[in-house]
Amino acid sequence: MDVSAAFSGAAPAAQRFDVGDWKRIAEGGVDYLGTAQANVFCIKVVAVPFGTHTIFIGQADEVLLNEDDRPLLYRNALTAE
């Protein structure tokens, strides 16, 4: 929950990676969250500009699964009054 809060605006951009168990792959220097439920490392196949965003399509190269952690789920539940 701390990582989710930091990346949703609770922490300044320069301090977001100070929260959580971040690791780095030596090859290419890619950072990933070590306690994530899953990490999927991809090789970029194509980047498609779309409006103000870019959609990246990749080919999975490696997958790390962490069965010890519980996933963070968000549910927008409506309450009856």
Image: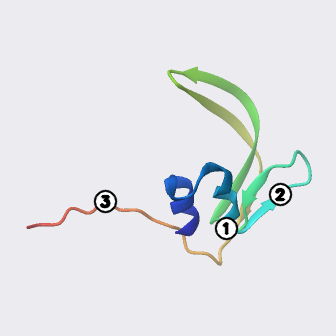
Q: Quadrant of residue 65?
A: bottom right
State the image coordinates of residue 9 (x, y, percent, origin top left): 50, 53
Residue holding disc 2: 24
Determine the secondary structure under disc 1: loop
**Between tags 1 and 3, which lies in front?**
1
Task: Calculate the distance from the C-alpha at mark 3 to the C-alpha at mark 2.
Answer: 33 Å
Identify the residue shown where x is 64% and y is 57%.
Answer: 16
Residue situated in front as seen by the camera: 39 or 10: 10
Determine the secondary structure under disc 3: loop
Mark 1 or mark 3, earlier in chain: 1
Q: Crowding near pointer 2: few (<14 within 10 Å), some, many (20+)?
A: few
Q: Quadrant of residue 37?
A: bottom right
State the image coordinates of residue 77 (x, y, percent, origin top left): 26, 63
- Numbered tag placed on residue 20 in the rendering: 1
Compared with 17, 48 (above or below) is above
Q: Quadrant of residue 23?
A: bottom right
Q: Quadrant of the C terminus?
A: bottom left
Mark count: 3
Q: Is residue 32 left or right of residue 26?
A: left
Task: Calculate the distance from the C-alpha at mark 2 to the C-alpha at mark 1.
Answer: 13 Å
Residue holding disc 3: 76
Q: Is residue 4 left or right of residue 26?
A: left
State the image coordinates of residue 30 (x, y, percent, origin top left): 80, 49
Residue situated in front as seen by the camera: 51 or 43: 51
Under mark 3, the amino acid is Asn
Under mark 2, the amino acid is Arg
Q: Crowding near pointer 1: few (<14 within 10 Å), some, many (20+)?
A: some
Q: How is the image coloured?
A: rainbow
Identify the residue shown where x is 67% and y is 26%.
Answer: 47
